[in-house]
Amino acid sequence: MTMSTTGGRRRPPTIHDVAREAGVSRGTVSRVLNGGHYVSPAAQEAVNAAIRKTGYVVNRHARSLITGRSDSIGFLLTEPQERFFEDPNFNVLLRGCTQALAAHDIPLLLMLAGTKDERRRITRYITAGHVDGVLLVSSHSGDPVAEELRAAGVPLVACGKPIGLGSKVSYVAADDRDGARDMVRHLLSLGRRRIGMVTGPQDTPGGVERLAGYREVLGEAGIGVDERLVVSGDYSRASGEAGAERLLELAPDIDAVFVASDLMAQGVLGALHRAGRRVPDDVAVGGFDDSPAATSATPALTTIRQPWDRISNEMVRVLLAQIGGEDPAAVILPTELVRRAST
Amino acid sequence: MTMSTTGGRRRPPTIHDVAREAGVSRGTVSRVLNGGHYVSPAAQEAVNAAIRKTGYVVNRHARSLITGRSDSIGFLLTEPQERFFEDPNFNVLLRGCTQALAAHDIPLLLMLAGTKDERRRITRYITAGHVDGVLLVSSHSGDPVAEELRAAGVPLVACGKPIGLGSKVSYVAADDRDGARDMVRHLLSLGRRRIGMVTGPQDTPGGVERLAGYREVLGEAGIGVDERLVVSGDYSRASGEAGAERLLELAPDIDAVFVASDLMAQGVLGALHRAGRRVPDDVAVGGFDDSPAATSATPALTTIRQPWDRISNEMVRVLLAQIGGEDPAAVILPTELVRRAST
DNA sequence: CCGGCTTCTGTGAGCGTTCACAGTAGAGAA
DNA sequence: TTCTCTACTGTGAACGCTCACAGAAGCCGG
């Protein structure tokens, strides 16, 4: 099997070729390429025809060299990669960002900062100006990479409210607190009064906010929070199982559980089932995320849907605006209660 | 909140600054940067010190402009994105490729060719030389994007044997056929003789190979294939459920089912449960993929594990070799039987 | 002492683009 | 007419790097 791998590749046409073909100068072609201001319709047309004929595609390296922009952006995931890569919502986010950027003809560079080495390399890469901005997924508090990027003045948009970064960094987040409030109100409206909670990790904004919403609503309802009804989890299925077991032990009279993630809620359902509690008759269960786990659970989970498609679109919009010189912005998007069989 | 977003960004040092700092010429710095041949130890040391001192990072755009290489590679997903993004193995693959490339200091560009527009744009982008090579995930047969890239001479490595692309494209795949053979042999060794199969889609290499392995082993064992025992699925949970129902209808006496994916196997387990068949006592069930679904199923699934981490590493290795001028290569990696409670 | 080899170094050119500037033509105002 | 303004176009310079080449220095064999 002898096949030259570089065989088919010719040197692509340059702006010069297009200019010659169209009978104009490089400058005019460049102007057509970048918005077409101050170009006569005739020249415009000739250039476009020449571009089509030659199959010209702009050389982004040459452009970047002079403009200083790279016209590409980084999608940066720091810290616990496993948690995210297993999270279906992360996939929706990654996909949404890629497509939103593609609409602007901007490529997305995937950057995973797992090891220390990777973190250093990626920080260098970004601060050297090889991307124009960064979409950041880092639920963790006090992320050193993020802090360094912020200090270097790199346009940055986080997914979820960053805990450690001061207020000067843009972020887009679902309204976790309000979603939690909706769910707890829903459980109250069903007549439940002994509502337990399995929380998410308290070093993540989502974990904090969901718990806060739970507390708020119970406070407002005049019921108050029984601290024995609050057990902590880490978003994993196993921690949901353990949480439910503790809950049943500490407070056997619970009639509802608000679980901070669907995956944990699956574990809760399992534990309740083994304990002989019927869902939702004895205990109603509410999740969070509307992940595939929610529909495949038995019974199907009532949950809170986060608008991940909108989140990714907003992240890209805010980042591009910021690269364009606008101020950092915070965007909070509403969630939606999805009622299924578990409540 | 008035904060200049570009405030902190200074013009980064150039090769010229490093040269001046080190008291040598640009050429010498460049030589140090690219392997350091024909450079005196003294100069070598002076340049490295200057690089550290100035914090110099090479400008990849300027380099690419002259070398013609982009030093970046594309990770291209064509066709049905939903199927893949929900597939945990896809995530492992994406992550593995990103990290393997990072070790070579090569960024990965994520490219999703969903719509016709995206396909055209991406094809242009790639053939214009903006990436040096492409890691391709496209189980579909006769992929037009892949065909175009191949024709344009773009270095290409597919994940899984591409069906429509002739033999001249590199690929890395798990040994689907051998994995299927292992599973069926395992079921035979348990004394099962009426072994049904729920296949994967027959326009994907995996689907074809797994069915072939099933047929081979039953043939070799002198049992032969009862065509009523073979029903087709599309890797979805629902199709597994439907497949099991048909199987029970056509051949109530089955004592085992080989299911071409874990997700489908979950559906099969559900259907068997509803039909009152005990697993594995009445019917043994074998899956494929070793996805999270396998462990969370009840009973936990015996399945075939594909070496996704090795696959991603090999894809990158083969692609870089091909970019370096080597011939296309095919790599087949062994699978592993993971025995759990369902057999 | 010369010529040739090896090892090392500096220099100019050029990659393909954008940008600033100079310049042209035509229209309208004085 | 002449001057100014607008709309448009072409030209060199620059972006930061690599590459080819020329040349210097040291060493060896003749």
Image: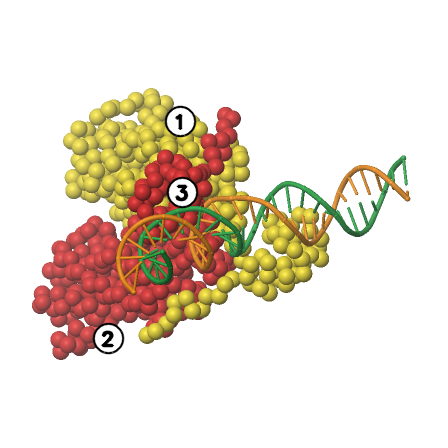
Chain colours: A red, B yellow, C orange, D green
Whether residues under marks 1 and 2 lie with C-beta atoms below 8 angstroms apart, the answer is no
Question: What residue is pinned by disc 2?
Answer: A227
Front residue of A110/C26: it is C26
Inter-mark Cα distance, 3 to 1: 44 Å
Residue A278 lies left or right of residue D4; in this view the side is left
Determine the residue positioned at 41% across, 37% down: A21
Say which residue label 1 marks.
B166
Both labels 3 and 2 in a single chain: yes
- Label total for image: 3
Amino acid at circle 2: Glu
| Relative to A252, residue B73 above or below | above
Which of B283 and B224 lies nearest the eye of the viewer?
A: B224
Which marked residue is nearer to the observer: mark 3 or mark 1? 3
Q: Chain letter for mark 2, please.
A: A
Label 3 or label 2, whichever lies nearer to me, is: 3
- The alpha-carbon separation of the residues under discs 3 and 2 comes to 77 Å
Q: Which residue is mark 3?
A: A24
Residue at x-position 33% and y-position 66%: A326
Query: Residue A120, percent across and down?
Result: 50, 60
Position of B269 with respect to A101 (left or right) is left
Secondary structure of the residue carrying tag 2 is helix
Within 10 angstroms of label 1, few (less than 14), some, or many (20 or more) residues?
A: few
